[in-house]
Every structure is written in C-alpha cells, then in structure tokens.
Image (tube, rainbow, N blue to C red):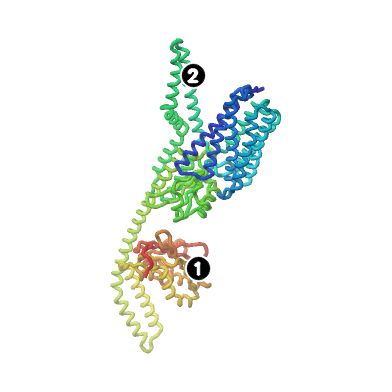
Amino acid sequence: MIGPEPLALASAGVNLLVSLIFGIIVQSNVQTSLRRRMFAPLIVVATLVCACLSFVFAMSTVFSLIPTEHHLQLSPILVGLYVVTDVVTFVSVALFAHLVLLLSSRDDDEPRRWLALNYGGAAAVVLIALPARDLLYDSPIIRDGAEVLKWGYILVVTLLSARRLGRAAREGDWRPGLIGTSARSDVWALAFAGLCVGAMVLLHLDGGWTLHRPLLSLLGALLGLAIAVPFVARSLGVVLSGLFSALGLLAAVGGSVFAGIWVGDQLPVELRLLGPLTTILLLLLALGPGQPALLALVERVVFRRSRLRREELAHFLRNISPDLGPAECSLRAMKELRRVLRFRGVALVFRDGDALSVGDLDAEALAKRFPTGAAADALLDRPRFGDDQAGLPADVRAILDDHDILGVVAVQGSKHLWGHLLLRTDLVATVYRDEGTVTVEVFADQLAVLLDAANLLDRAVEMERTLAHSEKLAAMGELSARIVHDIRNPVTAARSLAQQLASEPGGDEAHRIIVEELERVERHIADLLRFARRDELHRQPVDLTSLVHETVARLRARLESADIQVEISGPGALVVSADREKIRHVLINLIENAADALSGNGSRGRIEVSLESVGDRSRLCVRDNGPGIPEPALEEIFEPFVSSKAKGTGLGLAIVKRTIEAHGGHIAAERHEGPGVSFIVELPTENVGDAP
C-alpha cells in the first residue's frame, strides 16, 4: 500500500508538471499576442488564468514536499505563503468563470452585473475564508470550516461553469490552436475536475489536512491535470517544446550540482571550496551561454521533422511544371501539402469564387459562402491561425467554425490575390506553433509564385494562339478581298440586268428569284469586305448601359412583332473606352442572332441583356431561351465561314470576336442549364466619370 511519502512525491511531481504546462502556455500566449497584436478579451483572460494556475500549482509543489509536522506548526512564513496562494486561487477561479463566459457567449458582450457578481463573490469568499483559514489557525474547527467554504465555493463555480459550457459547446473533440472554441470534451474535463473538488470537500469534512494531507495533495494535482488537459490539447506543440526545454534546463542544473558535489568529494579538505565554485560556474554556463544552445538543440530534435517537411514541400513545388495550368498546379500542391503535414483537409478558395479541395473539406460549400472579389482582397492583413481568427468578420468566423478550419493564409501573387488557403487538421497533425505556421506561410508564398508562372505561361500560349489565329484570319481576309474584287462587278452587272428583266412587262417569278439571290450574294460580299478590312478604332468614353438601352429601343419594334420580349438589367452606368459604332454593331449582331434562334421556336421568346462590373472589366451578357447550340458547334462558333443558319455567311460572329479583341476584350459563348445560350462580352472599364 502506498504510504504518505510516495503520495506526497507523486503529488509534487504532478503539480510541478501542471505548473510548467501553464507557465509554458503563458509564455507562448504573451509572445504570440505581442508579435501578432492579439489582445482580444478571451486571449487576455485565458493568459491570466494560466498565469494564476501556474503560480498556484508551483506553490502546491512546494507544499507537497514540506513534511506534515511543519504544516501543523504553521510558522508565520508558511502562513504568509498560504494567504498569497489562497488569494491567487480565488482570483484564478473567478478568472476561469470569466473565461467560460467568454467561451459560451454568442457575442462579445460581457454583462456588467455578472462580472460584478463573479469577482465580488470571489472577494467576499476571500474576506470570509482567509482570516479563518490562515489567520485563526489555532482553532481546528474554524480552520476546517473555512476549508470547506473555500472548496465548496470552487465546487459551485466549477459546476456552474460546466453547465454553462455544456449549453454552448460544439459536438466533437478539441480543436488544436483554438482556445476560443468550446467542445464537449471541455465539459467532460470540467466534470472530472468537479469530481476531484467534490472529493476534496468530503475529505475536509472528515478531518481535512490533518488526516488526509497526502490524499488531498494528490486530488489537487489531479484537479490541475483535469484543467490543464484542454489547454494542452490545443497547444500540444508549444507544451512539448517548452517541457523538453524545461527538462533540459533542470537536467543541466542537476548535473551542475552533482558535478560540484563530486568534485568536492574528490579534493582534499583544504580545496573542497572548489566544489561549490564548480557548481556555480557550471550553473552560470548552463543558464547563460548554454541556454540558447540547449533551446536550439531542443528545436532541432523536436521540430527537425517540420524543417524536413518544409524542404520536401519546397522541392515538390520547384518541380511542378507551370504548363499544367493554375488549377492543376494548385490541386497537386494541395495534395502534397496534405500528405506531408497530414492535414485532414486543404482547400483553396480563389478570388473569383471558384474553389478546389482535397481531403475532408467541401470546396463547393466553401465557395458559396467565402468572400470573393474586393471582399477577399481586404479579408486578411496577415495569416490567421487558431485564436487569431478572432480578428476576422463574424460571418467568416462562422464559416471557419462550421468546417473546423484552423488556419487561413492568403495566396498573394505579384500583381493580385489568387485566393485563400484553408486548413483543417486534428490533434496530432496541427499547425500549433511558429514552426508549423512558417511552413504553411512559405508554402503559400511558393504556391503564389508557381501560379504566377502558370498564369504567365497560359497568357503566352493564348497570345501565340491569338497571333496564329490572327495570321490565319489575315490570310483568309486577303484571299477573300481578292476574290470579292474579282466577282463583285460581274455580280452587280448581273443584278442590274435581272432587275430590268423583272421590271419589264411579262417579267416572271424566275426573274424575281434571280434578283433576290443576287442581292443575297451582294450582302455576303459586303460581309467579306468588312471581314477583310482592318478595323480602325475611334475610341471615346462610352456608357455601355446607355448604348444597350438605345440599341434595344431601335430593335424593339421588330422583336415585339416576332413575339420576343427583351429584358435589360444592370447598374446605372458602365463606362468603357471603345468605338461607339463598332460596339453598337456588336450588340445588333448578338441580339439579331438571338432573335433568329428564337424564330419558329413555338413559344414566347425572351432575350435577357445583363451588365455588371467585375473588377476592372465590364461584362455584357446576351442570353436567349432558344433551342441552344450543340457542344461541338459551340467550340467553332467564332470561326469564319462557320454558321448554323441556312443562309448565313458565318462571318458575323467572327467579325464580332475580332472587334471585341481589338478593344482588348474577350467574348465567349456558354451553354447553361435550361434552354438557350449566353454570349458573354468583357471590355476594360474606363475610369473617366460619366460618358457623354
């Protein structure tokens, strides 16, 4: 059976461990808060709680090692230590209740009445219990009653805190790095702490410290462990590193003392003074120049894998070929990041709203809710990990909390933001300290460089294709111009002759058909000449919204006669630098093409013309509810001489595409759910105020 002395030693060891844990967390919180300027109430209160608990359990370590007879003598020095420790204990209990309030609160409001009751109650218990507990120690009954009051107060606060926390705790286990999120595991840890306190109350009713000092010390140590576990689970890397460093320093100190004693024993009596001097010298070396070397050794041993992982990620990113494109490069890099750092999930939400994910994250769900565009640009001023996410907007914090996302890092390219990297992890594989966060930040920077290179390569390839296409069109235009010039005069002469024959008495139906067909040939010739002619742009500020309304108004009578409804939506003004007449011709062509597609559709036709501003571009979309265009034809729709119309030349959309590209814009045709097709035109926005 374990006697009092082994119990006292075990209690001292556990108390020392708990004290070190809370001290390490305090040091880490202070350093992180100062570096990242994190001074949210929750972080401040949590740090104060840990500081008080570190002191309390350090004193408990000392008390556990003092023999029972010395406690019974109650010397003034020991009584003074009791008083200070009890005051700090009550302060830590009040702070812990405050921390639970912050964890369980749905907003940042702290009820003043509750705060006054919490801290006022702690002060009242101090004023009542301390004089009886530590000053009137001559009366065992009063002293034991004060102990019951003290631990009864702690029990009530613990149970109320567990009840409050249970109402707000999320399902699941602890989240690493996040003190500010409560979990069901916290409630269980707090319940175990309540059991320890309840047992201590019962022991104080049955003789207290006089009869049960070793057991009470052990229960106090277990209470400390129960409180420490949630903090350790969220700061595992910090605690491990700090413990290794602390144990290394303790070993150095112990080795210095042992070496001094050994040296003293080996020397003659007259030289034994060198023993203590040796101890002092070794202590100075251990706590002075040796301390940085020891810390560096701990870092290399404990976090050697982190550095190797960083090098592995860097090597992988250097060997990804940019010609895979931004999306594929991102996907491969994210898979490697997840594999190397053992994340549960990694997602990249692009600035334009697209998203990619690997592992246990839903890209589609994140893309629907995460900020995009200008909101994404302004979201982060620095990478956010763990409780540093408290500085993010409430809706973004809700998204991160719903998906158990630990870290958010911007992937910032040289000229624009690519998007945000979102990380989901567990208790083992976590970014819980600077070593891990630096690895992720370096990865994000290298990924941004890779995406810049992939984008630049894409643009170069696209430019090569555009140049090749332009050369092809130029050759076709030159050939077309030669052919047109050769056949235009004979066609004109034949049309004139046919018109004369059709107008003479006795002109028949055949003459009229000849005239119509020759007129159609002349229209084709006109299109060919326009296609062959180089565009000369006369740019000016053009209000695209006004031009759309004006063009639709001119075509409305014809469209309504064909039972086609036109709807226009968009902002009040979108100003672009463009050739007004050429853009008008583009609009007419797109609307007439939509009208032709709706003719004979068998139902009421509808054309939607929408405008919007997207970054530094103005977007125009012409959408109809017609039969649509087959996928193979959609890929060739802007090619010259490709037409789905029986009597079309296949040059209208080719001219439109060339006109838009001459303005520095882009046009595309897209199928969509439901009937019809959309033509999307993007033009650079002009920041010149209102157009004339």
Up the image or down, 626 lies above or below 280; here it is below
Up the image or down, 526 lies above or below 394; here it is below
Q: Is residue 242 left or right of residue 481?
A: right
* Residue 650 visible to an observer of this rendering: no
Instruction: Name the kind of residue labelled 2 in the image.
Output: Phe
Q: Nearer the viewer, residue 6 or 478?
A: 6
What residue is rendered at 46% in x and 44% in y?
Answer: 37
Q: How many marks?
A: 2
Q: Position of residue 367 (x, y in %)?
A: 50, 53
Instruction: Name the kind of residue labelled 1 in the image.
Output: Asn
Q: CA distance from mark 2 to mark 1?
A: 90 Å
In the picture, the quarter occupied by the C terminus is bottom left
In the picture, the quarter occupied by the N terminus is top right
Give the foreground label among 2 and 1.
2
Residue under label 1, please give it. Answer: 625
Q: Position of residue 522 (x, y in %)?
A: 34, 75
Tell me where residue 89 sits by quadrant.
Answer: top right
* Residue 45 visible to an observer of this rendering: yes
Up the image or down, 457 lies above or below 623; here it is above
What residue is rendered at 49% in x and 24% in y?
Answer: 251
What residue is rendered at 35% in x and 71% in y?
Answer: 527
Q: Nearer the viewer, residue 117 or 658?
A: 117
Q: Tag 1: Cα neighbours inside 10 Å, few (<14), some, or many (≥20)?
A: many
Secondary element at image label 2: helix
Q: What label does residue 258 carry, if any?
A: 2
Q: Position of residue 301 (x, y in %)?
A: 46, 31
